[in-house]
Amino acid sequence: MDKYNIFLVKLMFPKFELRSDLKKLDDDVNIDERLIELAEKNDIIVPFMSKFPEYKYEEYKGEYQAFWNKASELTGILKKNDLEMIVIKSKRDYRFYDGDLNILVKNSQIENILNILESEGYTNHTPFPDLGKFLFEPYKIWLEPDDNGFPLHLHRMISWHGIEYIPFEEVKKNADNKMIEGHNLKIPSYKYETLIMIAHSLFENYHLTLGEFYHLESAFTKLDVKEIFELSKKFGLTEAFNYVYEKVYRIHNTLFENDFVTNFSINSRWEKIADLEFPYKFEIKELSKIWNKRAKYHLKDYDLKSYIREKWRHPSYLFFKRTFRGG
């Protein structure tokens, strides 16, 4: 683990004491482009910049506020037309915003929503829209604004690479209205948002950022983890939950002297992780086991099409991501 990673870990976890072997690697770090880029890659640019306001804090703070302002504005526009949306993948246990605004909408309302958003200046930028329905993301639509604002991702369900994981209605009936930065917004319940983050790390990004680790470490100490475990069974995500939970436990014990406190029973103390750095890349062999288990979930309903799709899509996307995008 290099001094840049250690610096960011200390920034996010000031109350935890680093392990003694990591303290030896702790060294002075200059606030330079490399460190800022690493903070961005790890989804922690807002808390990072808040510690160093002499840099670009006001710029990022403005974007953070603009993100939630836009979420509120779109909620109001759709509500005025008796349409609904849920902001997903955005609320965390620290100040966070994404480069894209992800919203979950009802499939039967999608055409009306598209018409309204296009009248508001958005343009459909879904790549290869016809071919994409089969090869890419049939349940997601990309929209670009005309004012250089935040692109929109319209989701019909919680899905990745054209594979359904959690239906719209399940998220809707477990959604909460929350005040976020002065706006009343509908978001998934804390338990559902945590499960979505777990799945997102395994079926979309294939890694865990420091920001995601922070949120999950926090969520696993606040929630009844047994409830998340039971929820994961409902959507064929038990192996995904177990794997990420174990990783969070192991990462915590790799970094800190303090034990990871949780209400979920652990049979044995897992080994610490060697050569840890963030974003933490999951091993291909481990990912393959999880994908194969999830693919078999479709066979209970004799859904051979979804089984085959899930078997080949994740290995293909992982190869593309790590070969051409460095992820």
Image (tube, rainbow, N blue to C red):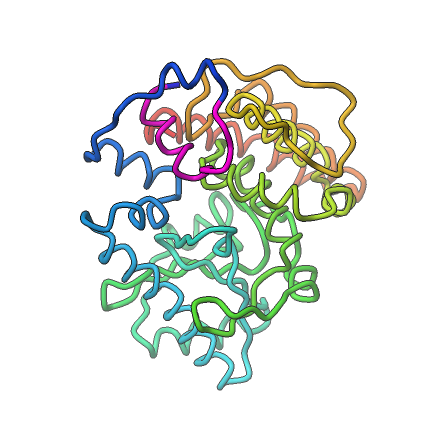
**Number of dots carrying numbers:** 0
Residue 257, placed above or below residue 205: above
**Quarter of the view holding residue 273:** top right
x then y, percent, for residue 309 = 60, 37
> Furthest-bottom residue in view?
80
Q: Is residue 46 left or right of residue 236?
A: left
Give the residue drawn at x 34%, y 79%: 119
Q: Quadrant of residue 4?
A: top left
Q: In this view, does 171 lie to the left or right of 118?
A: right
- From the viewer's perspective, is residue 71 above or below residue 272? below
Residue at point 58%, 18% (across, down): 285
Q: Where is residue 80 in the image (x, y as percent from the top left)?
A: 49, 86
Magenta range: 2-18
> Closer to the camera, 172 or 194?
194
Q: Which residue lies furthest to the right in this view?
A: 300
Work out whether residue 196 or residue 56 is closer to the camera in this orientation and state it.
Answer: 56
Which image quarter is the N terminus in?
top left
Horizontal and vertical percent position of residue 266: 76, 27
**Which image quarter is the C terminus in?**
top left
Residue 58, image x, y percentages:
23, 58
Residue 225 appears left or right of 30: right
**Residue 32 covered by magenta stretch:** no
Horizontally, is 303 left or right of 40 in the view? right
Give the residue displayed 50% in from the left and 28% down from the top: 17
* Residue 17, magenta (yes or no): yes
